[in-house]
Image (cartoon, rainbow, N blue to C red):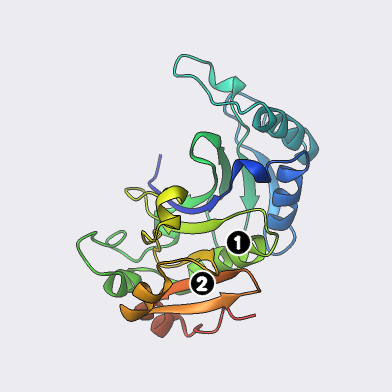
Amino acid sequence: MPPYYSVAFQYEPAAVRPDFLRDLYSLMLRGEFTYGGVLAWGCRGDLTLDQVIQWNQERLDKDFELGFTEHVSNNYRQVILRHPQYSQCRVIVQHGSRLIDVIVPEDDIFKIGGPFPTKLCPEALAWHTRPEQLEPLKRLALAVWQSGLIVAVQTYGELGAETAYATLKEGKPPSMRPFAIVEKGWVGRAELAARGIRVSPVGETGILLEPLGYIAESGDAAAGEG
């Protein structure tokens, strides 16, 4: 199994209503991504999207988390998204972490040599990405944010992890490899701006955070403005 790159959509329990996943999957499939079935891991691979939504939403409503000794067939179904630029793309419900995780192989995102060394600053880390490969995922993140269903978007490689929402609210930086979206009034905004992180509005409720190195290479400095 290859190492994966993640675009993690964080949500709060209060956002989980009967149509939460239906609305979320619909947003992800409204643009350039299409439905490719489910990962056949403990289930059939030919399930319809409605079947997947019903199964996953029932578990979400019950606050379900798979136990260590429980069979994988009881778990949330992993939706496959098709996109011509990615060899794989899956959507995983990680309810214990309050995440909806969109993953693609690291090789689809990073240049030769893998992701960024963690000892480097964010500005240097950004240069290890392939901007043309990152843009569809960034557009997906911007579209989903506008729904109001999520409270943060964070990005990281196989060895990375999201910042917990509780500490994010206190001002700890999100993981941005190489972008993140947080709420407009986030308390850490000024500190990151002083470090050279570009801060752009996302609609009326959010801000897009990007290291300047990524912006310079991608030529997409205004992508988050709206």
Q: Where, quadrant-wise, is the C terminus in this rendering?
A: bottom right
State the residue in front, 17 or 134.
17
The residue that mark 1 highlights is 84
In this picture, is 43 found above or below 193?
above
Q: Is residue 92 in view?
A: yes
Secondary structure found at label 2: strand
Secondary structure found at label 1: loop
Q: CA distance from mark 2 to mark 1?
A: 25 Å
Residue at 62%, 58% (x, y): give it.
83
Q: What amino acid is found at the position of numbered circle 2 in the picture?
A: Leu
State the residue in front, 87 or 26.
26
Report whether 146 appears left or right of 151: right
Q: What amino acid is found at the position of numbered circle 1 in the picture?
A: Pro
Q: Quadrant of residue 215?
A: bottom left
Residue at 25%, 69% (x, y): give it.
121
Report whether 146 appears left or right of 105: right
In the rendered image, residue 34, in percent from the top left (x then y), is placed at 71, 54
Crowd around label 2: few <14 · some 14–19 · many ≥20 (10 Å): many
Q: Is residue 196 in view?
A: no
State the residue in front, 142 or 108.
142
Crowd around label 1: few <14 · some 14–19 · many ≥20 (10 Å): few
Mark 2 vs 1, N-terminal side: 1
In the rendered image, residue 123, in percent from the top left (x then y), is placed at 30, 75
In the rendered image, residue 49, in percent from the top left (x then y), is placed at 76, 40
Say which mark, if any, is on residue 57: none
Residue at 43%, 74% (x, y): give it.
210
Say which mark, if any, is on residue 208: 2
State the residue in front, 40 or 189.
189
Q: Where, quadrant-wise, is the N terminus in this rendering?
A: top left
In the rendered image, residue 155, in percent from the top left (x then y), is placed at 44, 58
| Mark nearer the viewer, 2 or 1 | 2
In this picture, is 128 found above or below 221?
above
